[in-house]
Image (tube, coloured by chain):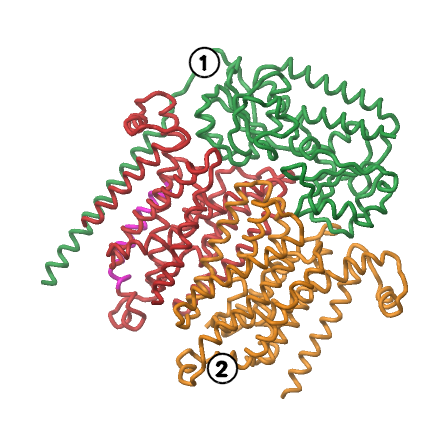
Chain colours: A orange, B green, C red
Amino acid sequence: MKNKYLWLFLLFSGMFVVLFILSMMLGYKHFTFSDIWQHYIHGETIKDQRVLTQLRLPRAILGGVVGVLMGISGVMIQTITRNPFASPGIMGVNSGASLMVVITTVAFGMNGVFQQTIMAFIGTVIIATLIILATTLPFKPFNAMELTLFGASVSAFCMAITQGLLIYNESAIEELIYWLNGSVANKHITILMYIWPFIIVGLIISIYMAKPLNLYMLSDDALKGLGAKILSIKVFTMIAVVLLSGSAVALAGPIAFIGLITPHVAKLLCKSHNHFIVIPLSGVLGGCLLLLSDILSRYLLMPRELPVGITTALIGAPIFIYLILNRKELTE
Amino acid sequence: MKIIIIIQLKKEVKEMRKLLSVIVVLVVMLAACGNKQEASSNKDTHEVKHAMGTTKVPNNPKRVVVLTNEGTEALVSMGVKPVGAANSYAGDPWYKHLEKKYKDIEPVGGESEINLEKIAKLKPDLIIGNKFRQEAQYKKLSEIAPTVFSKELRGDWKNNFKLYAKAVNKEDKGNEVLKNYDNHVKKAKEEIGDKANSEVSMVRFMPGDVRIYHKDTFSGVILDELGIKRPKGQDKNDFAEKGVTKERIKAMDGDYIFYFTFQEDDKKVSALEKEWVNDPAFKALNASKKGHVYKVDDAVWNTSGGVLSANMMIDDLKEKLNEK
Amino acid sequence: MKKFIILIIMLMLTTLLTLMLGDSFIAPQNVLSGLFKLGDPYTNLVINTLRLPRVLLAIVTGAALGIAGCVLQFITKNPLASPDVIGISQGANVGSLVFLIVLTTSTEALLLPIAYQPIFSMLGAIIVTALLYFLAMRKSYKRDRLILIGISFNILCQAIVMFLILTSNKRSAQAQIWITGSVHQAEYQQVMIVGSILFIIMVILTYYARSFDIHYLGRNLSLALGNPYQHISVIALISMSILIGISMSYVGGIQFVGLIAPHIALKLGAHQFRNRIFYSAIIGAIILLLSDLIGRTLFLPKEIPAGIFTALIGSPFFMYLLIKSRK
């Protein structure tokens, strides 16, 4: 039985690698596979290798990493809120990050990609902390609905202030429209150097949470009966979600849908709710989906590029509708 | 006991419903009152046909409010100083290159968010606006003063200029301005000589976005008038390519590259602009190697969009093309 | 009853206040003479053309949104639910932006006169409502499902909205203002339309008020008492979407009114459905009036759309509610 899951995971990991390489090859400038092979394996110089190393490679890395982060955090947030329609965005990561970026751009004129990233991360952390505190004080476990609604309201609040600032300062809209739609292009990969600790911590917590989350699928009452520490499960899971998806948003801006649909696709594929399997599988699927979207972004409007956040929405929406129509647990 | 309570409740509901009906009726009455408007008929008027219909406007408007940047330029160029105008997109509240000329004009809000009460307070006798921006406010503006709208805001400022001239009844002065402009263009063409065969590339930096501009833009139209060529990728009749990635730096090449950066303070050089202009791929472009990369003023070359800026842009362009 | 009259008086005072304040201050007696067109032309103009339509629209849409929020909270039994989070408002936004950005020529001029925008807004709201019905309520109404699916639609629609704004070259500012929500484009005709629809729906809801009260007791009790559980749910959904759809058509994406108003109503002691919807209506109107007033006066010469303030007041209020309800 375990073998089946291993095969699934390996299959999609393989697809991940393929898409990664394709992401390096395809685009406005075409590279052939032998170009890449020669350059990286044999160390030969090839034409336009700057594009390959300085533009394509970071982009592929970002795409892969961000996709994985969103896939993993998606599973966790859906389990913890018992809401198959949840996505990491409800923890305010998207709106908090956007708000911070807009504030610093409008009020302080910060306008570098690097600064945007740091500010986005700080914004995420602030808002998420607020949500976590509000839903866990006074140290009673919150119920899933409360978190969902609260997160949605906080997001609305952030968006309203964001919009207010954008209206107050018309030029800011044009400056920020690309950040607000999410993109893995034109970003600085060096940012990973600053964010990786948060990613690692988040991943470690996720691994620890796999077993408790499996238990969590039971109702709150049953959990109490088992003596499980509900509150700590919830809090640690939320922290992991914030660290992972917050990093993702800081790196690439708000990207919709990946955290929403990959958990379902993963569960559909392996026909199981076991988090030890679903979490990694969803992560890999997330990476695949984002890499695929990024490749498509380059081709849909050649030579223009769409921000990847839009392509994921374009691909994600039909998948989402398909899921709704066909997944029993979503329609009952 | 219960029955008494129920009867009381019923009474309350009836009362509330009565109250609500009264409120609704009041609202309707007020609305009906508000709908009628006295028609003003003036003999000292002439008719102007515009994007929203035909309107009678005064023959000698003294207090004009204009609601687009390019419209303000048009009026000022004809010697008509409006009492109120829409804010510039940069500067506080006017573009730096037009500040002096715009002294004493009252700002009435951005093109997309005009403040109707401010306009009314200025007691204008003519309002000039644009359908693209302010269609929803046309009715209210007409009640403040006779209102004329141009249809669109495209790269070619001349489209709207003639309408504005007719609206303020200064068609002769308007034609004069146009003629002067055409002469300016002709002279500039001569001075540029065969440099006109150079391909000029237009790039804009905005901290969240990098764009390559095509022909349906303010600068694109003027370059075309001067007979200057565009690089193949830019020789299209649309607006621009947005969201350009560094892979496309090669597409920015030409004999000359002019770039502008959209920002409020021209002392702050955008980090993004610096990053791209110093990128090795950018430095490897033909234009860079020849030293033909110039930064120009975003307001003059792009955002303000009117005849005054057009004249300034031509001189600026001429100077840079003729640099040795 | 006394409380209700106090509320009405507050509404009238607020109305007077909003007519007095703005870019120029108009004294109360001039406001009155302006209303009946007896003052000087300038005052008449400002009052009747510029301020009164906004004020009236704020009142009727504020009331409509307040009622919609009340209905939702009743049928979901969830005091934290707000019509804005279940996607109907965002659906209306998508409709509006499709009109402003998709239905345009190559130079971004509108294909249809701007008067047609409300139709698309309404369409957006209706489509989302229909989807909500099919996905959450078809077989049987389940409270939680409605909210959960609604939230995803919200996110989906917000993504579409951002996408549309991105694709526009010249209309991003206009679109941005629209989705924030503002009464600055108010016209008398709009007031009449919203007002009449409001009136009709109020009558319908008052008629079914008792059924709503019973619906609150839950599915089993409702059915035991012979109350049409499913029907009430459907009536609620339809009336909510009509109220929200028509309001959003003229006012853009104003949020939170539907959340705050019913709560204040509850605090004032309006427990029964019948009372609560009336209270919510008045309170909603006052909230929107004040938001518009603040936006028009506090940041002169810039005008900030009312939607910002409804959210600024609304969110902290909501957070406070949440924390309080957990103690």
Q: Quadrant of the N terminus of chain B?
A: bottom left
Query: Looking at the image, which is closer to me, B183 or A276?
Result: A276
Q: Residue C117, image x and y in percent?
A: 49, 42
Q: CA distance from mark 2 to mark 1?
A: 83 Å
Q: Residues within 10 Å of mark 2 (few under 14, many from 20)?
A: some
Task: Provide the secondary structure element on which disc 2 rests.
Answer: helix
B195, C88: nearer the viewer: B195
Question: For this view, does A300 lie left or right of residue C194?
Answer: right
Chain identifier of the residue bearing label 1 in the image = B
Residue C206, magenta (yes or no): yes
Q: Residues within 10 Å of mark 1 (few under 14, many from 20)?
A: few
Q: Is residue A284 above or below residue B49?
A: below
Residue C129 as seen in the image, left or right of residue C158:
left
The three-letter amino acid code for the residue at tag 1 is Asn
Percent position of residue B307, x then y: 67, 24
Q: Which residue is mark 2?
A: A215
Give the quadrant of residue C12.
top left
The residue identified by callout 1 is: B42
Residue B218 as seen in the image, left or right of residue C68? right
Question: Main SS of the magenta segment?
Answer: helix
Residue occupying image coordinates x 14% and y 59%: B6
Residue range in magenta is C193-213
Task: Name the residue located 84 percent from the left edge and 26 percent from the top edge.
Answer: B192
